[in-house]
Image (cartoon, rainbow, N blue to C red):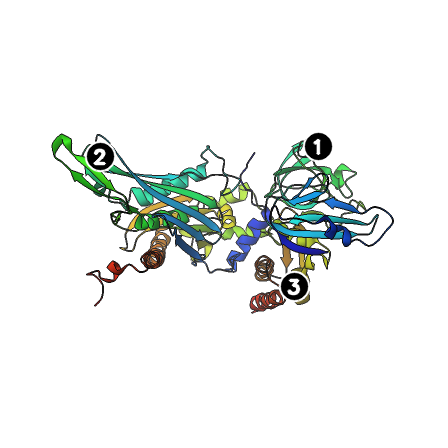
Amino acid sequence: MPRDLTPSTIENTFVLKALTERIRLDSRSFNQLRDLDISFSSTDYGVVDVKLGRTRVIARISAEITQPYADRPYDGLFIISTEISPMAAPTFEAGRKSEDELVISRIIEKSIRRSGALDTEALCIISGEKCWAVRADVHFLDHDGGLMDAACIAVSAGLLHFRRPDITIVGVGSRREIIVHPITERVPVPLAVLHVPICVTFSFFDVRKASSAVAGLPGKDNTKEEDDDDVEEENDSSTAVLVDATLQEELLRHGYMSVTANTNREICQIQKGGDMPVEVGKLLSCSEAAIMVAEKVTKLINKRLKEDEARRNVGNLLVEARAENDR
Amino acid sequence: MSSEVILPGDPIPLDSLIDSLEDSDSAPVIQLGPGILHIPPETLLPVRAGTLTKLNRSKPQQSTTVYVDTAGGRYVPAVHDTILGTVIGRFGDQEKSFYRVSIPDSAAPIGILSSAAFANAASRHTRPNLSTGATVYARISAFSLALGEPELECFDEKTGKEGGFGELKGGMLADVSIGLARRLLAPSGVYGGSTVVDLLGQLVPFEIAVGRNGRIWIDSESSKMTVAIIKAIQETEEFPKEQMEERVQKIIKDARQ
């Protein structure tokens, strides 16, 4: 039977002690992301492979024509499916949603779908009758922390990369027909992506707990007492804030906050978990940091998209002749 | 010992195994390890990709052990293996109590450790009292897949003394591939030996415990050094010797600054 990974006292003590000396286990600095690698499928549109350190996520975007919801005749459908299989880590059970999994799907849902990253009105074909249903399937291949960050990057990049077949509507009234042009016949159309949300997770460690743990007094009673302390007592040195935690750090952290931001300096979503209060200053500095990361990641996505397009269009003279090119 | 990369379905000529054995009166013995399928009468077929490893033994009889070695996969418990586990619970009464030990990354994730399975545990008062979350270095004393839970012991089976087993305090745990764990435990010379540990040992004093389940425990003079040693071991897994030497020296030098 799969069970949750249980971090040992040794790991707990060591990680906290190292953090008081400002050391992370993978010798990163506190606000440094792991190596991020984004690659697109060379054949299909909308298939993205994101590697964040040892975490690996693949997202696949697909689209089909369906009927819109009766109450929203002008909107297309956008569904994100984030099912975590035991392939990512043996702690995940197939078919049974764990609490972690729920949080992950919720954050991705909030970050991308509810922040309006995809203009669903642009997916409408004939109001009330036909619309595009865009589907993002996220596959978690390897779990070393930061699943939601990696998934968010993957879906965002996938939406930018995806092309749907072009369509034409012929006829009038009830005799209208939709012709779907295969992508071999007509240049496929990109989706209307309004902004690129990037999720960044900050992990909080109460390093004051380090001293008590080192003294050999770990235990529930001890931590209870400290949780009751006034928030005002906390200063910067009492909390260590880590960006992009590994699985080990995720298991040991006392609290976390996921911030989704975009390059327009908009905060799309904030989710705080764990039993640690976060004061206003920290919230602001984390948001600021999230925007910085979002800018960096978006830059990388755009760079990779350009490279991919260049690879696809080798020998395509029409690309050279585009009006928007530099002369 | 010799090794070559092999893929499923590649031929393994039987002669190559027998030739390597020295002449003796008795018939040559070939032992098959994991990853090799025997199709009678005398076809050997590798069923997974990896390094084909042959180990020659002269005692108790002339024999060759042949198997396909891979770095990855999940740990499958085997008797006599040493593992690093975490105590996650306790059951039983005062007289006879047992610890439930989680063995991370294992095909059988929970082992049972009797509180009497320690050195000097004859009396109830000398038995160690492990709390939840304690890390133990233990040996698997009994296991079969049908049995389910491996049975653990925390003493040297030859001497009955502590022998490095038992609760580990301080230091840090880290994950390595189970292939590397196996190599770290192998005697010097086999698999190119536990080269990285030898190299590190020349540079810095530290303690190490290696669990066959792909976990290692390291303790050294400072947190910074411990992190560096873990990094050196994890990073240089696939390095050839000269490169490994260079890299290990650099990591330790950086940690000293």
Residue at image mark 2: A130
CA neighbours of label 2 inside 10 A, class few (<14), some (14 to 19), many (20+): many
Residue at image mark 3: B200
Vertical placement of A37 versus B42: above or below? Answer: below
Chain letter, disc 2 residue: A
Q: Is residue B57 visible?
A: yes
Amino acid type indicated by mark 3: Leu
Of the 4 image quadrants, the one containing the C terminus of chain A is: bottom left
Taking the image as shown, residue B133 lies to the left or right of residue B94, namely left
Element type at mark 2: strand
Chain letter, disc 1 residue: B
Residue B94 got which mark? 1
Query: Are callouts 3 and 2 both on one chain?
Result: no
Q: For the point 37% across and 44% down, which residue is it?
A: A60
Amino acid type indicated by mark 1: Gln
A246 vs B6, nearest the viewer: B6
Chain letter, disc 3 residue: B
- Residue farthest along the left direction in this orientation: A172
Amino acid type indicated by mark 2: Lys
Q: For the point 64% across and 57% down, which residue is it?
A: B219
